[in-house]
Amino acid sequence: MKLDKDTIEKKLLQFPDWDYYDNAIHSEFEFDNFKDCFSAMSRIAFECEALNHHPNWSNSYNILKISISTHSAKGVTLKDFELAEAIETIVEVED
C-alpha cells in the first residue's frame, strides 16, 4: 500500500541518508574506489533478489546512486523502507 507524504517523512527520520522526491526515496553512497562500490552493489543485488524488490540505481566509479519505489503501488511503500534498511546495513559493513 502506498504511503502518504507525512508517513514517508516520519519514516525518513530513521534514514538520514535518504530523501523523498519524485515519488521515490533516494540516496547516494561514496566508496573508496570502484571495487568497493561494486562489491556493495553485488551484496545489495542478492538482498534485492531475496526481497524480490529492485531499485533503480547507477554507478559512476566510486559513487552509487539509488532510487527506490514500488511500481505496482505507484509510490513508496513499507517494502521500500525494508530494502533501504537492508542497503544501509550492507553499506555500513563496507565502511
Image: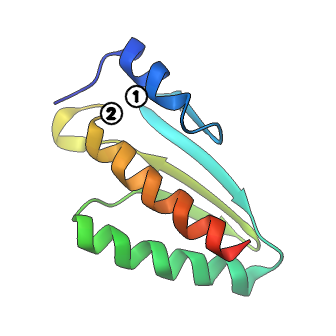
Check whether the beta carbons of the residues at disc 2 and disc 1 lie within 8 A of each other: yes
User: Looking at the picture, how far across and down is residue 24, in whole percent?
Assistant: 43, 35
Along the horizontal axis of the image, is 80 left or right of 90? left
Along the horizontal axis of the image, is 84 left or right of 48? right
Where is 88 relative to 41, above or below?
Answer: above
User: Looking at the picture, how far across and down is residue 14, in whole percent?
Assistant: 54, 35
Where is 54 relative to 84, above or below?
Answer: below
Q: Nearer the viewer, mark 2 or mark 1?
A: 2
Of residue 92 and residue 80, the one placed in the foreground of this image is 92
Name the amino acid, label 1: Asn
Task: Say which residue label 2 marks.
Answer: 76
Quadrant where the image shows the C terminus: bottom right
User: Looking at the picture, how far across and down is residue 60, in whole percent?
Assistant: 71, 68
Helix, strand or loop at mark 2: loop
Of residue 28 and residue 59, the one placed in the foreground of this image is 28
Which disc is residue 23 wearing?
1
Which numbered disc, 2 or 1, marks the residue that appears first in the sequence? 1
User: Looking at the picture, how far across and down is residue 93, in whole percent?
Assistant: 63, 73
Helix, strand or loop at mark 1: loop
Along the horizontal axis of the image, is 90 left or right of 81? right
Name the amino acid, label 2: Val
Where is 9 relative to 71, above or below?
Answer: above
